Image: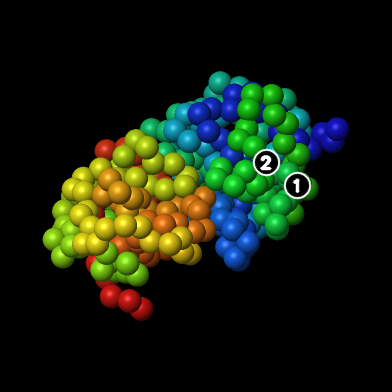
Amino acid sequence: MTDRALAVVRAGALTTVQDRGRPGHAHLGVPRSGALDAPAAALVNRLVGNPPGAAVLETTLTGCTLRPRCAVTVAVGGAPCPVTVDGRPVPWAAPVRVRAGAVLDVGAADSGVRSYVAVSGGVLVEPVLGSRSTDLLSGLGPPPLADGTVLPLGRPGGRHTRVDVAPLPAPPAELVLRVTPGPRADWFTAEAVRAFTSRAYRVSPASNRIGLRVDGPALGRARPGELPSEGTVLGAVQVPPDGMPVVFLADHPTTGGYPVIGVVRTPDLPAAAQAVPGTPVRFMAVRRR
């Protein structure tokens, strides 16, 4: 086995390999997947000298512990968290040199949900449909990491960025999601449409990579029955029979039979990836572009 590899000592609650995903395959029933907080993933890649689309690790809440088999440059960003090498604190959101055999610990998130770990050369698992991303819905890509997993690494292609700490947005204290109404807003009562963009919601603990679920006022239907399944897009806000909106994220299904009351603007979705359960959510109606 090559010495350019990374051993997983502690996988954490949910750590997956992610890159820019596999957009363009919805007609085949394949979700786009990819890093939920794409700007954070691109930034840590830049910090270690990788191209923006190199595969990184996406952790969830509890971080992970890694042991490189070769000397590497590492950067951790996204959700702020303590980072140590062999028990000694090292900077977050900055490139750090880690010797072969040292233990890199990415701690639990101090705020936010998902941290991103970039390693010089990128994670070089086998691509599927042009992407190395784990897709939790379809099962494409590598499985979520487990203790003892060994990940191959690529060859470093560039010099790391020389910064003390890179600027990253803080996880949201309030999540404001700009939403374009439709295409099935007419399936809801006028009162429900008003409530959707005027009442307060909160992030539900049931949220995951497939969708951001919220708790709040239920949205009542104006017509009974269900739609025939139709295509859905990233950011679609689907409303199941319980009336609680679900914002589709990277691993969302490509079709669905519940009506979509609106679609969240794509630039607002990275903040949704970092919103902890209980975060206030406000949907703000905007005109179609």
Q: According to the image, what is the colour scheme of the structure? A: rainbow
Residue position marked by numbered label 1 in the rendering: 126
Quarter of the picture holding the C terminus: bottom left
Residue 143 at x, y percent in the picture:
64, 37
Residue 46 at x, y percent in the picture:
59, 54
Circle number at residue 142 = 2
Q: Amino acid at mark 1?
A: Glu
Picture residue at 21% right of the left edge, 49% below the top: 218
Residue 160 at x, y percent in the picture:
64, 50
Q: Does residue 265 appear anywhere in the picture?
A: yes
Residue 155 at x, y percent in the picture:
78, 48
Mark 1 secondary-structure assignment: loop
Front-lying residue, 102 or 201: 201
Picture residue at 27% right of the left edge, 38% below the top: 278
267 sits to left or right of 74: left
Picture residue at 60% right of the left edge, 56% below the top: 30
Picture residue at 56% right of the left edge, 43% below the top: 136
Front-lying residue, 78 or 35: 35
Task: Tell me whether the residue at label 1 lies in contact with that at label 2, contact meaning CB atoms closer than 8 angstroms.
Answer: yes
Furthest-front residue in view?
A: 225
Q: Amino acid at mark 2?
A: Pro
First in residue order: circle 1 vs circle 2: 1
- Mark 1 and mark 2: Cα distance apart in space: 8 Å
Q: Does residue 269 appear anywhere in the picture?
A: no
Front-lying residue, 269 or 161: 269
Mark 2 secondary-structure assignment: loop
199 sits to left or right of 71: left
Place residue 153 in its image quadrant: top right
288 sits to left or right of 253: left
Furthest-right residue in view?
A: 1
